[in-house]
Image (spheres, coloured by chain):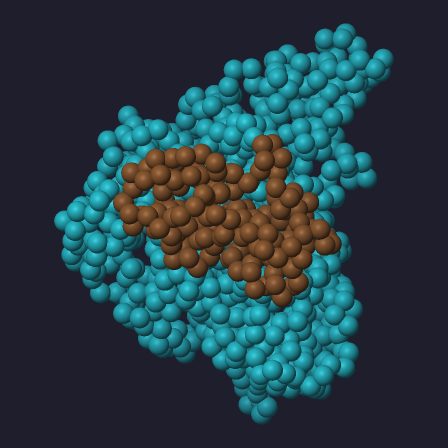
Chain colours: A cyan, B brown
Amino acid sequence: MGKIAKYTRRGFMGLGIAAAGGLAVGYYYYKKPYPNPLPDRLEPGHFSFTPYVIIGTDGAITIITPRAEMGQGTHTTLAAFVAEELDVDMNQITTDHGPAAPVYYNTAAMAEGGPHPFFEDGFVAEALRSAMGVLGKFLALQITGGSTAMIDGFDKMREAGAMAREVLKMAAAARWGVSLELLTTASGEVLHPDGTRLGYGDIAAEAALLEAPKSVVLKDPSEWRILGKSQTRVELLDKVTGAPIFGIDVELPDMLHATVAMAPRFGTKPLSADKAAALATPGVLNVVEISTATVTGFAVIASNTWAAFEGARALAPTWGAASYPNDSAGLTALFERALEDEASFTFGGEGDAIEALQGATDVIEARYSVPYLAHTTMEPMNATAQLQNGKLQLWVGTQAPGLAKMVAADLLGIDADNVEVVTTRMGGGFGRRAEVDAAVYAALVAAETGGRPVKVTWSREEDIRHDAFRPMSLAHLRGTIKDGMPEALDMKVAAPSILKSLLARTFPSMNSPGNERAILDGAFDQPYSWPHARFAAHQVDTDIPVGFWRSVGYSGNGFIFESFLDELAASGGQDPLEMRLAMMKDPRHAPAREVLKAVAEMASWGQSLPEGVGQGIAHVLSFGTWVAEVVQVDMRSGAVKIDKVWAAADPGLVLDPANFSDQISSGIIYGLSAAIGQQITFSDGMVEQENFYDYDALRMAGCPEIEVALLENSPRMGGAGEPGTPPVAAALGNAIFAASGQRLRALPFGNAVGFDLG
Amino acid sequence: MELMVNGEAHSVEAPDDMPLLWVLRDMLDIKGPKFGCGVGACGACTVLIAGEPVRSCVMVVADVEGAITTIEGLPEGERLHRVQQAWIKHEVPQCGYCQAGQILTAVAFLERNPEPTDADIDAEMTNLCRCGTYPRLRAAIKTAAGMEG
């Protein structure tokens, strides 16, 4: 398997890095293209065509896929964009994350940040989308998140492939002395009408000297050979042979190992630590204090990871008192008080819900709650760093290499130009790797090793207890029914701002980010027409760090809002499916109706089921993808057994059917794991959970059968990684209600009912 | 102490109570076994010792008796093990981090039970996968067993 080892090495060494790339941020850049960072980094005999294509004279073709590959298959589909237009086959290419560079900014990640629903296409919404995209470029956000990689890459990476193809044809036309129009391309070769062929590698050097055409014509989708069809993952072989492709597998000459023990009460400083005991642990070499804008703690440096873990245990630090309520009951009380306060802001809404509810006699009222959640990626947080002569090299599985570079440079007091980030493959991300803590701690530890590289690996306990958690939230909902149909809704949500928390730990000098739509996502922006509706955020911030957890605000509100709709349906004597369809009145809601009807047909919705068996339905539009799900549960044994989950999803355009379907299924399992049993709770100011024995997820035996159908009615492209998650908790809770009459309003359900997980 | 890993003899100087996982990863640079939890709860670190699956993060190195096989030692030369081939056929991995442990667990399990039922698979395949590849894992095990899929 020599070939695998060579490829892997290439992955870790980046592209034969010669120099660090520039991070140029200036207001005038929003109109100017950023420079191609590749030429400075190429091995001899390799040429770059656009920032996305490298061709070697040996015929090797590398496609830069600058979004984080964490299991969602993004490298395969991004590479397919380029390969489709470049006219190469998928087995002729390799992929690489590429360097952290501003040219790889993610326009789409910012585009849906404004306070408007996805289906809103009015002037203001469009202008804001465009302005937010410019902002993404301005900040050079090379981030993977919000299920945006395909939307962002769709045009620019196809154009890159077409650009490269055209210059290769121009070089061949010059070599042969024939007209460009006579030439065609296929499978990495330029074809002469007389049957002569030239491989791309044979003409790469000449082509690299030519000026690229000003514009290119992209293929019509009817001509696609690769896109729209299921592709084999580019990294499949590596992943069944155990190739060392992950951040935790980085091995460098003379490398040290370390772990961290950071303040378990967030925002506090150490009161004491037994450094002597830590240093007496065999293999431990040093104990250093490290701190960032919001976190203080220790790193234990050792000759191997286990010695570092043992040293950290022996260190046994003690910490100051927390600034927030010490336990979950106290936090709940704090959030409840926020619900009683005046709203921080409202989004969307129709009519006058407050007036409609005033004096109404039959008000349906409910309180819902969702807990803090950890991400628990399979690969615990880790990063490797080396600081030599004022230059920092980072090897890290990150969803935000540009951010890691900026924050690490700032904390070390060096120029961002002197930081190079090599992005490794990731053992799961789910939003956790959008945080830069692992990279930054490694950078700080590297400042203490006299220039030796150091790999910093967190224990699972550290990983679970120092997450940027999915926020806890409490909601208070009131609704009324008229003629069997929902008439008014007032939904109040108490939750912290993720962006405020993120800014505090990354850019503490920056101002408050303003009204955060994540607090109300999954409710105010859903495709329903109401006579009266109000969606109010009651922002409540603490020092407990909160972050982006697969589907972000939709994960909690999808459950709350779609469960309460089910309550309104029951109160109005309506079928939950028919009521939703009737509320989706606007023509722009059509894709929602179609996925609901599709999933209902798949699940034989409305069929007669035995007593104790029930189906629940939910629909959530998130990240541009419309997803309806039905869950069937069997409670005849007393415990909840999940028989099956059906899903119908509409992302507008399905680029890789098998991968898209797998992502929906993956999102469902991730959401079920949380809905059944996951919760992060607090005691003594610290997270109570430690490891998979008290923060588990579904295993094989508990995983239900899942059936997914894909539709393409939506007018704009949506994402894949997150939209499967939001509807499933509501569909499960609604199924439990259908089977038992028991309405569950707090996640995880496992606190109230038993589950039969095989 | 002496360890036999993937048919190769290694002499290592490690504390007796050091888990096998870290001897393999940090001392012998064998990175196939992954660190997931350190308490034997997830199975990412699974290796075979004398053909039996063992969670190497809780197996102290002094207690190892028998030859160790990691994912690196599973193929015969360039030829992938039939379980690996089934994983490729069903394109099982997503992030891939747990898959070496899943594959080795399946290899040992199919040796003992060449024609497993779904209930057998549920009982034996207890390793955690956070991407939720379970439906394809199940199909691949059946293919490796020559049953269906």
Q: Is residue A453 left or right of residue A536?
A: left
Q: Is residue A671 visible?
A: no
Of residue A652 and residue B27, the one placed in the foreground of this image is: B27
Residue A536 place in picture, x, y as percent: 50, 71
Instruction: Tell me if residue A243 can be seen.
Output: yes
- Up the image or down, A654 lies above or below A226; here it is below
| Residue at 64% in and 20% down | A59
Q: Depth check: A457 or A131 in front?
A: A457
Rendered residue at 59%/47% (across/down) = B93
When the figure is inspected, residue A261 is found, relative to residue A544, above or below; the finding is above
Looking at the image, is A707 positioned above or below residue B72? below
Horizontal relation, residue A299 to residue B42: left or right: left
Q: Position of residue A46 (x, y in %)?
A: 56, 18
Which residue is rendered at x = 50% and y = 75% of the image?
A: A750
**Residue closest to the far right:** A194
Front-most of residues B99 and A500: B99
Q: Position of residue A409 (x, y in %)?
A: 33, 36
- Vertical placement of residue A168 versus A563, above or below: above
Residue A347 point in image, percent of width and height:
54, 65
The quarter of the picture where residue B122 lies is bottom right
